[in-house]
């Protein structure tokens, strides 16, 4: 980790130094006079540099978190879309199989009905002509 005097933060507006660094303490250029106004301005510049650094750092953390959240949501959306697509394919396959099963059942029922009708007619003919058992 950087020491306080070495911390730098890259922002869209450039590099912000942490408070106490050489750049931050030089925000307001002063001659080396020791009057109170110069000290006040120097302290104010350091406080402002600290504030700007903290704000830029907080914004960077926020932006990174939002970016991570968006990427996570995009991944969940992608997976959801894939799941929905697979569900739709499975459902279509189910309906196709159901229709085929119904057709097979109808064919089987029709075949059984045809066989029943033929046997009934055969039995009626046998009885009519006396071919059946008595």
Image (cartoon, rainbow, N blue to C red):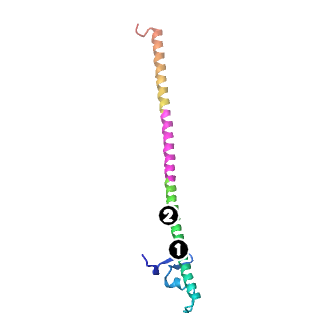
Using the image as rendered, state which of residue 43 and residue 80 is in the foreground.
43
Residue lying furthest front: 36
Label annotation for residue 116: none
Residue at x 52%, y 74% (from the top left corner): 54
Residue 102 drawn above or below residue 25: above
Name the spot of residue 11 as percent of width and height, x first.
Answer: 54, 75
Residue at x 49%, y 60% (from the top left corner): 72
Residue at x 57%, y 81% (from the top left corner): 44
Q: Which residues are magenta?
A: 80-103
State if disc 1 and disc 2 touch (CB < 8 Å).
Answer: no
Q: Residue 59's quadrant in the figure?
A: bottom right
The answer to whether 131 appears left or right of 17 in the picture is left
Under circle 2, the secondary element is: helix
Which quadrant does the C terminus fall into? Answer: top left
Using the image as rendered, state which of residue 78 and residue 118 is in the foreground.
78
Q: Earlier in the sequence, mark 2 or mark 1?
A: 1
Residue 53 drawn above or below residue 92: below
* Location of mark 2 (residue): 68
Using the image as rendered, state which of residue 120 and residue 43 is in the foreground.
43
Does the magenta run of residues contain 19? Answer: no
Residue 79 drawn above or below residue 48: above
Name the spot of residue 22 as percent of width and height, x first.
Answer: 50, 85
* Location of mark 1 (residue): 54
The answer to whether 14 appears left or right of 129 in the picture is right
Q: Which class describes the residues within 10 Å of circle 1: few (<14), some (14-19), or many (20+)?
A: some
Residue at x 46%, y 22% (from the top left corner): 115
Query: Marks 2/1: CA distance?
Result: 21 Å
């Amino acid at each position: 980790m950087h020491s306080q005097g070495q911390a730098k933060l890259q922002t869209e507006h450039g590099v912000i130094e942490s408070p106490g660094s050489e750049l931050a303490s030089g925000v307001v250029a002063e001659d080396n006079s020791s009057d109170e106004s110069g000290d006040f301005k120097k302290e104010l510049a350091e406080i402002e540099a600290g504030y700007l650094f903290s704000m830029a750092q907080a914004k960077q953390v926020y932006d990174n978190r939002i970016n991570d959240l968006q990427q996570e949501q995009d991944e969940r959306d992608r997976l959801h879309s894939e799941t929905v697509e697979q569900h739709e394919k499975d459902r279509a396959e189910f309906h196709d199989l159901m229709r085929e099963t119904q057709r097979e059942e109808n064919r089987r029922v029709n075949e059984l009905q045809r066989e029943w009708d033929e046997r009934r007619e055969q039995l009626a003919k046998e009885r009519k002509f006396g071919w059946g058992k008595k």
